[in-house]
Amino acid sequence: MTGAVTSDHENHRANRVLLGLALAYFLLAWIPSFAGTAGYFIDETYFIACSERLAFGYVDQPPLSILLLRLVRASIGDSLPALRLVPSVAGAAVVFLTGFIARRLGADTFGQALAAGTAMLAPVYHVLFGYYSMNALSVLLWAVCFWLLVEIERRDEPRLWLGIGAVAGLGLENKHTIVLLALGLAVGLLLTPARRHLASRWLWLGLGIAALVALPNLLWQLAHGWPSLAFYRNADAYKNVPTAPLEVLAQQLLAANPAALPVWLAGLGFFLATERGRPYRHLGWIYVALLVLLLVGQKSRPDRIAAAYTVLFAGGGAGICDWLRRPGMRWLRPAQVAVLLLCGAALAPLSMPLLPPRLTARYAAALGVVPQIERGEDKRSLLPQWLADRYGWPALVDDVERVVRMLEPAERSHAIILAASYGHAGPIELLGRGRNLPPVYSPHNSYFLWGPPPDPVDVAVVIGFGEPGATGVIPEEPLASLFAEIELARVHDCEWCMRWRDGMPIWIARGPTSSFREAWPDLMHFQ
């Protein structure tokens, strides 16, 4: 066994502190959903659409988070507070678990609170736990894996590899990127004395459990031609922004909170350079391997390895608490906490919908922080994308409804709405309930699998095809070849959303010239 021995009294005291921080984070994450300053995030509307069409997989994600969403909707509905309950609870659990891992690494109460508080103030976690998605569960599942990895060494209990296998399998059923954790762990094991586990039957049994748990989604992928592989290839080729190594590092600093740098660097040093951290060397190498992968690949998404910071924050709490016990160093404790709080508070309006959009835009411009995480001029906004994609959906549905009302009654009964992406289709389906709108189809991601529209389609309200702001542009091939007549019906404007929605033409297409069933594969878009 390694790590400092603490009294039951100190553990009870630490538990109260960690539970208090977890509760505070839960409220911080959940209360904005009641405020009404922002609406559904773009992906939430798509996830709701997926939850109405349960399957063992989807083009862009495995099924676990969608199944959980279906249960949430069946029990408490799909209002914003209902949807945001799960990610808020997941965030609170991560805050608690980060501090608890620090305890298992030998941190005192202050070190545990510092680790948990650093996780609580990380802007990237504010984003990931701020709306319903697989990302919130992903960070939590990574944190559970890190805790079990610590326990394997601390208790010398290799049978816990079975637990890691089960959690990793759930992770694969939640988000495929947990393979990055497995890749980093493989590097860490090979480079440290922990490589002894490679000869343990428990590790390989755990790997078998992970594969067994993930099997339903793997079989679904096989049956559907591995659509997620095409999705990931296209996203890497056309969506992710190539990012220079120095910018990758800068994005990591900003995502984790610049004031957290001493904490997670201390955590990295604890794992890689201290005697107490020696049994856990491989945990430090996990982060190094993943960071190198980002730097070499020049990836634009700082959230890709966000889940790895939980263990670095925990290691930082364990490493810093000893250093701050030295004579003359105790004053640094309140100083470190104050800097973390100030920097976290300063960045919170950019990662959470705390202010009206106009004030948020001014604030972001003043700080010079409006990151672009996807390619294209249409993927820019006055607000960060994770905030911009919460605005304008009711107005979009209103505009679509106005166009539908322009149709003759006979046309309306046989019309469809054809949306270029799930970002158009999801909000129309969700917020168009009870408005007697035509059924919605899209060739984008899993919506493609839910099509094509039944032939013949006499008239379609078409949204998202053609260039934003270029109202004279007729939608490009192959859509234009499907109808003899395409007319501009309305232009949708949106001040605070992403540019691809501002000045967006809405068309009415009449006179089908070919079959949707035949043309549907040409319209397919996985990205």
Image: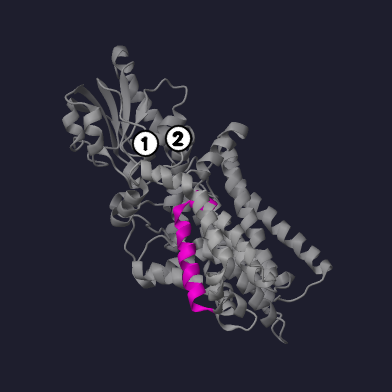
- Residue 447 numbered mark, or none: 1
Q: Residue furthest right?
A: 9
Q: Secondary structure at mark 2?
A: helix
Distance from Cα at disc 2 to Cα at disc 1: 9 Å
> Residue sitting at 37 percent across and 32 percent down?
450
Above or below 185: residue 414: above
Q: Which residue is mark 2?
A: 49
Q: Position of residue 169 (x, y in %)?
A: 53, 53
Q: Is 425 one of the magenta-colored residues?
A: no
Q: Position of residue 287 (x, y in %)?
A: 50, 70
- Residue 72 numbered mark, or none: none
Residue range in magenta is 170-192
Above or below 49: residue 63: below
Neighbour tally class for label 2: few under 14, some 14-19, many 20 plus, Cα within 10 Å: many
Q: Is 178 one of the magenta-colored residues?
A: yes
Is most of the magenta stretch helix, strand or loop? helix
> Residue sitting at 45 percent across and 66 percent down?
183
Q: Amino acid at mark 1?
A: Tyr
Neighbour tally class for label 1: few under 14, some 14-19, many 20 plus, Cα within 10 Å: many
Above or below 386: residue 107: below
> Residue sitting at 48 percent across and 32 percent down?
52
Q: Cβ–Cβ below 8 Å for labels 2 and 1?
A: yes
